[in-house]
Amino acid sequence: MFVLPVHCAELGFVDLAAREAGTTVAVRGGGHNVAGSGSNDGGLVMDLKLMRGVTVDPVRALARVQGGATWDDIDAAAARYGLATTGGTVGSTGVAGLTLGGGLGYLTRSLGLACDRVESYRMVTGDGRRRWIDAEHDAELNRLLRGAGHGLGVVDEFTFRLAPVPRVYGGRFAYPLRYATPVMAAFTELMADTPADMTCLLMLEPWGDPAVRSVVANVFYSGGDEVVVRRIERMMACAPLTGKDFGPRSYLPMQASLGETDFGPRHRRAGGHRRGRHPYRPGRSRHRWPARPRVALRAPSWRSVTPPASSARSSPPYRPGEESARLYDSIAALSAVTAFSELKRARA
């Protein structure tokens, strides 16, 4: 059964009704979670898709975001003022699910994870209480919500710190699959000496129309050093290109460059059109991977998780350091290894 609250006050009523009925509860934000934490079997799903409000304070560089919002929503609202925060590279991803799990994005290496950018949370915890959570109020729960926040309650509002990101250099370089070896060598050399405001992704995916198997480098640079831009162009000229779309643009179209995923129920506009379609990529592939069989996923009830009790010993405030950048670099290296393994399998 689905429940669609439209106000934060309704969350407590839903929780009380579920307790009285002995029903497990799952919370669905953007519907992007492949692990199944946004659904359950035979229980109640609290779907927040009607709570998608975003309010931006450009003077204080803060954004208040409701729990059902997607990154399309927050990116569009913040971009009006030339501001942004670390967010998912797929616009239909839910803000809540990504942030509570940590949250990687193009700005991770320069601004930190999405959870690093949260100023405060407003939530209903598993004991039915409504709380404001920040570094000064319930510091223990504040730390848990930053990366391990799934299952602790319903966060109906986040307050994010924003940063100026008026213009970026970004886009894609596409190569035939047979040039994967020199492309991966150039990509590795490029990533070995990159500034903190540059993020690159290397992917194996269909490209063109008709679609052919390709190696695609997705490059994002939010700095303004022309030397770095020329180095990117020089390094990526390592093999014949089948497509190129790299240049200056605003942050918003860069966020839409990976399109959106095709699994699960998505937030839709009136008339059923999907949000976040890529506005500038030429020759977008119409290829679709073969459909995978659906499986039933059982998620634990968030009500079964006991929220941490306030301790007399005060916890140190959460202070994001260099861990986010190191984590992103490690994941980028792992992605390169995975791409190489996929290449070997494709050639076999």
Image (cartoon, rainbow, N blue to C red):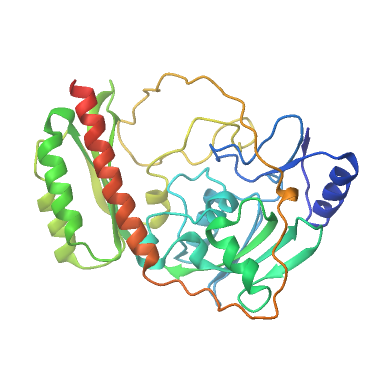
Q: Residue at x 45, y 60 (%)?
A: 86
Please state if 64 lies on the left or on the right of 284 as rendered: right
Q: Nearer the viewer, residue 186 or 260?
A: 186
Dividing the picture into quadrants, the one containing residue 315 is: bottom right
Look at 83% across and 52% down and name the residue there: 10
Q: Is residue 111 above or below residue 150?
A: below
Q: Is residue 120 visible?
A: no
Horizontal and vertical percent for residue 212? 24, 23
Image height check: is 12 above or below 295? below
Q: Is residue 331 visible?
A: yes
**Image spot of residue 67 (x, y percent):** 66, 53
Q: Nearer the viewer, residue 303 or 200?
A: 303
Quadrant that contains the C terminus: top left
Determine the residue located farthest toward the right in the rendered image: 20
Point out the image quarter for the N terminus: top right
Taking 151 as reference, is 98 left or right? Answer: left
Q: Measuring 91% from the left and 44% from the top, which residue is drawn there?
A: 20
Residue drawn at x 75%, y 67% as measured from the top left: 131
Q: Position of residue 56 (x, y in %)?
A: 59, 66
Picture quadrant of residue 242: top left
Towards the viewer: 295 or 221: 295
